[in-house]
Image: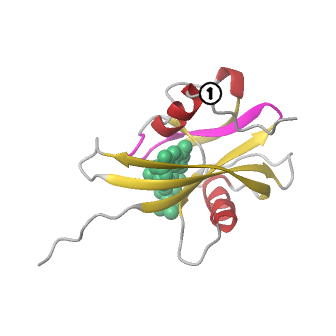
Amino acid sequence: MEETQPVPRVGVVLFVLKGKSVLLGRRRASIGESTFALPGGHLEFGESFEECGARELMEETGLEMGKADFLTVTNKVFLDKSKPCHYVIVFLRAVLADPNQVPQNPEPDKCDGWDWYDWDNLPQPLFSTLDEMVRSGFNPFPST
Ligand SMILES: Nc1nc2c([nH]c(=O)n2[C@H]2C[C@H](O)[C@@H](COP(=O)(O)OP(=O)(O)OP(=O)(O)O)O2)c(=O)[nH]1
Ligand SMILES: [Mg+2]
């Protein structure tokens, strides 16, 4: 039988902002195990980036997304795992529909839980892509 060739996949990942804080959760997943990462996941057939972001945020945190806009895109190959992965990741900046919503953890097998972290005092270790962005001086907050 012919082997299926690996292909790049598209992900949508959210910087959910509240004041000077960003929403992060410690991953329980093969890629980035035990690192702090942003909510997000795979783009499904027919979805807009915003629809995907809102769906993933609801599935992973129970939070309802408000306004979102495009920030940047990355193109990253993860070769350190037994199954190599290649992701084009679209990063959106988002706020909550209601800023008083409290994050839940409906997928405890995938994440230890979600919390708000001050951008100037981020937890360690960060997920590799996020770590690279922070080190390069990337800032998800709107310039005022
Ligand atoms: N969640 C998340 N994914 C990220 C980040 N940075 C980054 O490159 N990715 C890439 C690697 C992930 O394997 C890929 C897809 O996200 P994911 O691993 O959370 O996917 P998922 O299980 O939630 O997706 P799904 O199957 O539920 O659709 O996006 C990040 O900060 N958070
Ligand atoms: Mg995810």
In front: 70, or 97? 70
How does the figure colour the protein chain or chains?
secondary structure
Q: Quadrant of residue 136?
A: top right
Q: As drawn, is 100 to the left or to the right of 69?
A: right
Q: Which residues are magenta?
A: 19-32
The residue carrying pointer 1 sits among few (fewer than 14), some (14 to 19) or many (20 or more) residues within 10 Å by Cα, namely few
Looking at this view, name the residue that lies furthest to the left: 1
Quarter of the rendering containing residue 3: bottom left
Return the x and y of residue 20 as percentages of the image width and height. Answer: 79, 30
Dividing the image into 4 quarters, which one contains the N terminus?
A: bottom left
Query: Which amino acid type is marked by label 1?
Result: Gly
Can the viewer see residue 107 in this picture?
no
The C terminus: image quadrant = top right
Question: In the structure shown, which secondary structural element does the residue marked by tag 1 occupy?
Answer: loop
**Residue under label 1:** 137
Q: Is residue 130 magenta?
A: no
